[in-house]
Image (cartoon, rainbow, N blue to C red):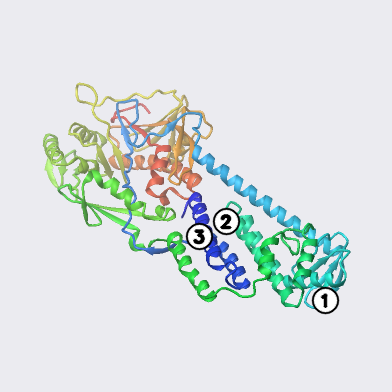
Amino acid sequence: MKTPYLYIIEVCLCSGVLLGLYRWLFERRVPFRACRIYLLSAVALSAVIPALHIPVYPAAPVAVAPFVAPVESELVGTAEFVEPVMAAPVVGTLRALDWPRLLTDAMRMVYVGAVCVLFGWFIVRLVYIARLRRRARLTDCRGYVLAEHAAVRAPFSFLRTVYLGDGFDGHRRVIILHHEASHVRHRHSVERIVMEAMLCVLWFNPFVWVAARRLREVQEWEADRDVLDGGCDLTEYRMTLFSQLFGYNPDMTCGLSHSFTKNRFLMMTRNKWGRFAGWRLAAALPFVGGMLCLCGFTTRTTDDYKTATVHIASDGSVTLNGRPIAKEELLDFVTAEREKFAEADRKDLTVRIVSEPAENPRIFIAENGSVTLNGNAVTLDALESELKAFRAGLSTEKLADTYVELSSAPATPMSAVAEVKEVLRRVPLLKIRYRSDECSVSRMLSPVSGNDGKVKVIAPVPNKRNDLLVFVDKQSQVRVKSGGSQSKIMSLKELSGRIADFVSDKAGKAKQQVTLFELPDGRTVDYPVSRRAVFLSIDPRTPYNSFVSVQTAIAAGFDAVRDEVARKWFDKSFAALTDAERQVVWRAVPMNVAEAEPQPHAE
């Protein structure tokens, strides 16, 4: 889809070329009817051709920039929350002026205002002619209706009606009626209405105004020729034309008073057309085809060209659609390929990333606390050693995509899981995916803090409004507490709803940071990013399956808020968003979840 500025430029270019072709090949060289048809067609084509989107040119597969998924953070022992590393949004309570958007909006308002004014004036003139006809004395004259009224200062015709004032009699009256009857017979008023309508829409194009004047000129030439061919004396007709030169009639009508006098007098003595009139008309076709190729043809956008494949080999080499490229050149190649597509199609383009990462480590914890790594039994010390060796063999790119798959027997106490998590922090391998028989959830472990190599257990402020405390005891009972209120027992479904209400903070009671987000479609929106946090405390004897279920319920609460924001900004669910749209919503609704190490509590 073209930008409005490019469309305007192409409309002016097409109309300028076609009008220049008219002056060079057609004017005074081909029959009047051909000139009229050409002028109307030229204006219409100059508006239609740039608006076309004809997929003809072959295009290489196009890809959008690779999607970097933000990592949901699990934070232990720190008061700050780690958020996805992305382009920092503009923060502030006052929104920065977007001058290009303001200029575009102002131009749209000017355009719409001018169209409304021109159409309004067009309607006013039609109403004037209709009222004049109702007041006039009507006479049916075979092929047209004569409307006579004293208010008509100069004769004119509109559609099938000829308007005539007082003081016209004798041979002069016959000449005038013959001239206006020619306009009616050739339906010049219909052509004038069509041109006026196109002029209202394309008022910004100076060549359209010139074409409208040329059309009126050709129509007058044609009516003059019909009068002279009917036997009227040339000198007498010229005197009649002079006598009406300073009269008035609506400019959308046809009449003797239009002031093309000099050219009209020259055309009255022209009886033959130039040679090869038919060939001149045929010569216009290559020019129209050229404008179509220049402004209407675009790159081909079949389904075969909507997906690009980026392949990352085990040795770190990268290919784009089978073409080897350097890793640092990937963004430039993707950007270049993207620009080959029309803007309207870019949102539908996808990139498929195929890589050969090392297999994610799989850790299983039995109910008695024993650990296996990729199916082999290991001690905690051996687990740490093997994971460090595994990590040392990863490239930076592969390390960013590597998760530790952690699963456990349903009744395994969380104290055993905590010991394995301490090992992962020391390695470090911080991306972890908890799995159970029913669900799974991904988290980011916080790194170790302090000289002792351990993560300190955070102590949330009990009466702080920005904190929501979630306790899970050894019986898998979930208690929720906020501010200074008493804790309340909730089901997992109720917990998700409570999390959603807490995070959305529609009452605006919590600390917020108004942030300016730029959406993928160019819009910018202000959104109050909540700084509220969920603190999860687990009893050491809590079963592993209960821990994963609670984590999943918490994630569902955040997802409900994200879905609401997605529907507000993009009018679709969060699951239906594109990668770029999903990243924006992720930044607006970050998952601030802090998990304390398992410890007994009174609740």
- The residue carrying pointer 3 sits among few (fewer than 14), some (14 to 19) or many (20 or more) residues within 10 Å by Cα, namely some
The residue drawn where x is 59% and y is 72% is 34
**Which numbered disc, 3 or 2, marks the residue that appears first in the sequence?**
3
Task: Return the residue nearer the eye: 21 or 266.
Answer: 266
Q: What residue type is labelled 3?
A: Val
Residue 305 screen position, x and y as percent: 34, 60
What residue would you read off at disc 2? Answer: 207
Task: Give the residue type that dot 2 points to.
Answer: Phe
Q: Can residue 406 be seen in this view?
A: no
The answer to which quarter of the image holds residue 459 is: top left
Q: Nearer the viewer, mark 3 or mark 1?
A: 3
Q: Of the residues under marks 3 and 1, which one precedes in the sequence?
A: 3
Residues 200 and 480: in front is 200
Observer-nearest of 64 and 278: 278
Q: Mark 3 points at which residue?
A: 17
Compare marks 1 and 2 and give the one earlier in the sequence: 1
